[in-house]
Image (spheres, rainbow, N blue to C red):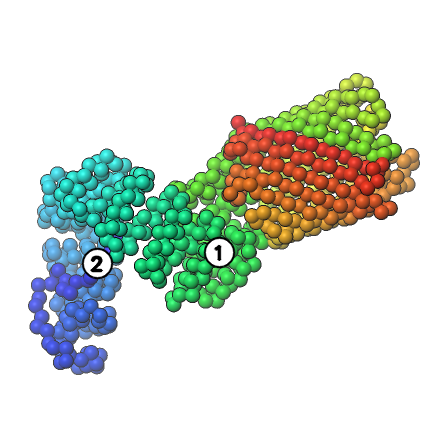
Amino acid sequence: MMSIPAKSHAVSPNSDMVVNATPVAQISMDAFKAGALDRQETLNLATLCLADPQSQNAEEIANKIVLLYPDDEDVLKIAIQLYEKILQAEKALPLYEHLRKLHPNDTTLTLDAARCYGWAGRIAESLNLYETVINSGNGNDLIQAQYADVLYESKQYSKAVVCYRELWKKGVLQKKYALNFVHALMATGEQAESTKLLDSLAKLYPGDTEVLKATADVSFAMKDYGRAATLYRELIVKKPNDLSASLWLTDVAMARNDYAEVVKINKEILQLSPENQKAMLTIARASSWRGDYSTALFYYDKLIASSNPDPLYYREKARVLGWMGNQSASVSLYDVALRTFPHDNALKAEAEAKKNYYSNTYRPAVRAYKEWLVAEPKQPEALFDLGQFYIQDRRWKEAIETYDILLTEIPDYRLAVLARQKAIVTSSMMSLNSSAEYFSAQSGGRETDVSFSGFYTSLSYPFQNRLTGFVDFNSKSYSFKKYAQTPLSQGITLGMEYCNLPDILLRGAYGFHQNPSPLKDSHTGFLETESQPLDNLHLGLSYHKEDVISNYKTLQNHLQTNHWQGRLVYDGYRRWHAGIDYGIDHYSDSKSSVTAGMDITANLLYDPQRLSITYRLQDYGFGADAYPKADYWTPSSFTTHTAGIEWQHDLNKERFQGANAAYYTAAFRLSLEPGGNVSHQIHAGLHRDWSNRFSTSMDYQYTWNANYDIYNDRMLKLEAKLFL
């Protein structure tokens, strides 16, 4: 938009009237307020007000003289000048329209009105008035240049280039318009032409700082950051007291993601201007982006403690606290900000959105983020967080659309680019998942010794946004301690998945397993559903028809189970969650068992590394009255208490939904069993996303009992996933 010049007119260009000013001592503002001044004295007072750059009475005088003399052209012209002086362009526009009705063919008046419309941001009306003058044949070269500038300000770059080019060819384009011509050419993609024009301007105006600045801007736009930085530094040398060049140099460092350089430049600015809030804000932002949270918080605190703090300072500091994982402090700061600025709608919406984000309540969070985007359309933080929520619940289409909006505004928003790419790959490409597993269990005299080597391959294909089909191939080679046979079982499973979380997820599959003779082939399958009926309450129900292979006898007898399972989890805060579950097994030999459990997990550290402690109570009911006793159970029902500590260490710098991840995990668990037995378990894992399309993982687990004859097992699994 065109802006009103910093130094406003003392006399409007549409006024050829000369007013004889009366000495200030003879004119009393008090008398004016009392209505004691006649027309001439009022005009004299208004003229003095125009000439006084410190006058505080311009708006009051203008408002009153318009009421006193609504049809007096000279008075209206003075009022227009007063409104323009105090940057009240909207109030001047009705006066221009009144005068234009009286003098519709006054070219000067029409042009002044056009400029005022431009200052007010009403570009369409400004262009219309310029075109009226030009079409009437009164448009000289200067007017044509001004018209081109308005086209440029309204982003009609192609039209502006046509006008500028014609004037440039005629050799009448003044420097300030030629510089806009340079930027218009860049906007239309005519980079070579823009560079040629700058070379010509450099010859016409050697050493001119405005031309130097335009050359630096063009280099920046062309992503020639090295040359741009060199030119901006030349500007700093030529204009050492002008901080603007340093701020432009900051933009170059930002574009390079060189946050250390950003901080360095702005600290130099603070040496010249210690209270420069823009520099402090830039340091706070750059420091937070590079993970230097203590520096960021220091400068946010200085900004908040300033004499007239902006609500944005509170909001950005609260965001940083959230990034640090200090969510309670973030919420508290939002509350302080709301008490300080109770009528700030954007602040209200952001506070509500972030509180729901921290508590992981999907539906209220999405509503709050959408309200935030109503208050601040295309707000980057809101769009990024909303995209993260969509990815979390596998709403790929919504996530991609949200990131598209964000990247339209900020094409170089790297995290959004990465998340969008990951969402597209995951949602639209077929995936191939291959793994190999070794498992061995020993349990003394209870005949539940089994070992196997398994190889698995799974293909998954997205049919549409929410519907996916999959086929799994598996091969298992078993070995048993008391039997020489090492049967090889091969199987295939076909299934479909419909995902519309948080409302519903459905998965179903049928499987067929071919066993060597004389073992019977088997048919398996499952049906699973997940839902979040209430915020933070997750419900899962499943049915599985499975082979029971605890020893060779269960394989030989073709033992199968119909397993029904229900689980309810409350996830009310990212720091902890708790769950309960209940399972029933009906075996093909007419026996049954019941298992029930409850657990709680507390995250002592949440981000960037995670340290959790867990507890689980598990009850196994094995039908003690059944006869004969099942050789795949323990002799009687029992209850265990298991406590564990788990650690996850992220190896990648960026941790967000959609980022390529690299981390290792480690866990140790102790389980107290009946009779004073203690079972130990260690688990270790390593995961690496090598790219958006390829990842690998490795898991190892070892379980042993204080009494070796009771039970021990070990497991090793290697897995690779590729999107095709």
Of 698 and 384, the residue lying toward us: 698
Residue sitting at 59 percent across and 45 percent down?
A: 502
**Label 1 sits on residue:** 294
**Amino acid, disc 2:** Pro
- For label 2, the crowd category at 10 Å Cα-Cα, with few meaning under 14, some 14 to 19 and many 20 or more, is few
Of 135 and 625, the residue lying toward us: 625
Number of numbered callouts drawn: 2
Alpha-carbon span between mark 2 and mark 1: 41 Å
Is disc 1 placed on a helix, strand or loop? helix
Residue 214 is left or right of residue 285, and the answer is left
Relative height, residue 342 to residue 236 (above, below): below
Residue sitting at 22 percent across and 42 percent down?
A: 182
Residue sitting at 10 percent across and 73 percent down?
A: 21
Q: Is residue 121 at least partly visible in the picture?
A: no
Pointer 2 and pointer 1: residues touching (CB < 8 Å)? no
Residue 348 is left or right of residue 140, and the answer is right
- For label 1, the crowd category at 10 Å Cα-Cα, with few meaning under 14, some 14 to 19 and many 20 or more, is few
N-terminal label among 2 and 1: 2
Is disc 2 placed on a helix, strand or loop? loop
Relative height, residue 98 to residue 384 (above, below): below
Q: Is residue 440 at least partly visible in the picture?
A: yes
Relative height, residue 261 to residue 497 (above, below): below
**Amino acid, disc 1:** Ser
Query: Where's residue 35, x and y in %?
Result: 19, 80
Q: Residue furthest top?
A: 517
Of 477 and 235, the residue lying toward us: 235
**Label 2 sits on residue:** 5
Q: Quadrant of residue 15?
A: bottom left
Residue 596 is left or right of residue 311, and the answer is right
The numbered mark at residue 539 is: none
Q: Quadrant of residue 10?
A: bottom left
